[in-house]
Image (tube, grey):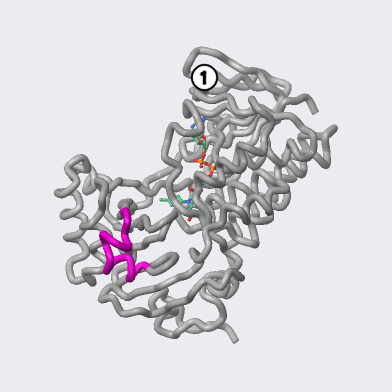
Amino acid sequence: MNTPVTIIGAGLGGLTLARVLHVHGIPSEVFEAEASPASRLQGGMLDIHDYNGQLALEAAGLMDEFRGIVLEGRQALRVLESDGTVLFERGDDGTGGRPEAQRGDLRRMLLDSLPAGTVRWGRKAVGARTLGDGRHEVTFDDGTTVVTDLLVGADGAWSRIRPLLTGAVPEYAGKSYVETYLYEADTRHVAVAKTVGGGSMVGTGATEGMSVNAHRERGDTLHAYVELSKPLEWFDAIDFTDAEAAKARIAAEFDGWSPELTALITESDVAPIHRPAFALPSGLRWERVPGVTLLGDAAHLALANGEGANLAMLDGAELAKVLAARPDDVETAIAEYEQAMFVRCETPMEEDFLLESIFGDDIPERLLNLFGIEERKA
Ligand SMILES: Cc1cc2nc3c(=O)[nH]c(=O)nc-3n(C[C@H](O)[C@H](O)[C@H](O)COP(=O)(O)OP(=O)(O)OC[C@H]3O[C@@H](n4cnc5c(N)ncnc54)[C@H](O)[C@@H]3O)c2cc1C
């Protein structure tokens, strides 16, 4: 294999690839659009699952470091009906398979595990072209270029590498998320802090595509994702720089919901942030193009389902492993990686497995009904 492997994007997927390659003694260079590790708030909590994200961390040799950044107690879960009725409640005894960590801590952990200088910050790819014989040239927004024998697009939803493989582009999925933050919640937002509890909370009603979800982040910050199914134009008509008006407009859609749930919108300490949901066609595949491949959101951007970061990390680890196993036959290695990734993304997760992973094996009937599940298999 001619190295270094060239990775575009220092998100969780690209960094896991770089780390697992490093574990196997294979050098890589990662080009990242952001100017520095601190240039964007890497907000949000991620639950890292024992059936995908943790497998990647094991391959990366970082499980001990990961345990050090897990936030205790955050696997607690509450599910509420829109009127505030508690349908499900579970504490965190530390034995669950979905420990939670801050995304920024995960990224920092991966960055710290790489040789100095692996990530080239402030290098935004603006285009890429095939030179033939499996070689590619990537152009950056500062006018510089890099030529590589092995190019990996790990540059997320709006990948500049994806067009080398497929013409598919993400489309608006008909719904958006609105993010809010409530700081010092145990003293300043007491009722809503109790409603969210020690970990995650899902508030859901009769209308599909409408929910109020929150996590307790580090300390007592509450971070909410409000799900609302509306066309993009509806959101475009809201001035999100006018915090109070935007909060009122979003909250009005949840008229009749419990005040402890709507308070996650109205009591936000920041202006609500609009996050439109885009997705690539499900089951997207492409023909093999020598010398280039994709991972994570660049390959299979999907509606938020709690798996995206986990899958991006698993892709990175799996790609590194096949490259390490076949250093003299990179094309066969990438073909193997892509086939496995296509199948992984196309195969719906077993409902019973997923339910048990999230809720354990004692799920109230009303909760199942709420999620549109008639009855569980014996
Ligand atoms: C609101 C929300 C909540 C989510 N919650 C969860 C969750 O709870 N659990 C979960 O598993 N997943 C979750 N996801 C999904 C998860 O965030 C993504 O699937 C995951 O981040 C994908 O990782 P990635 O490395 O493929 O891409 P990204 O994380 O998008 O990283 C791509 C990197 O490439 C860089 N980049 C982009 N363009 C260029 C360019 N042109 N040149 C150079 N660099 C570039 C970016 O700056 C970034 O650093 C959520 C997503 C959203 C939107």
In percent of the image, x 54 and y 50: which residue is there?
Answer: 309
The residue where tag 1 is placed is: 140
User: Which image quarter is the N terminus in?
Assistant: top right
Residue 188 on the magenta segment: yes
> Is residue 29 in sight in this rendering?
yes
**45 vs 52, nearest the viewer:** 45
**Ligand 1 neighbours mark 1 (CB distance < 8 Å):** yes
Above or below residue 312? Residue 18 is above
Q: Given the image, on which type of amino acid does mark 1 rest?
A: Phe
- Residue 121, image x and y in percent? 53, 25
> Is residue 294 in sight in this rendering?
no
Above or below residue 99? Residue 287 is above
In percent of the image, x 28 and y 73: which residue is there?
Answer: 82
Q: State left or right for residue 177 relative to residue 309.
A: left
Residue lying farthest front?
187
Q: Which residues are magenta?
A: 183-196
Question: In terms of secondary structure, what is the magenta stretch mainly?
Answer: helix
Residue 70 on the magenta segment: no
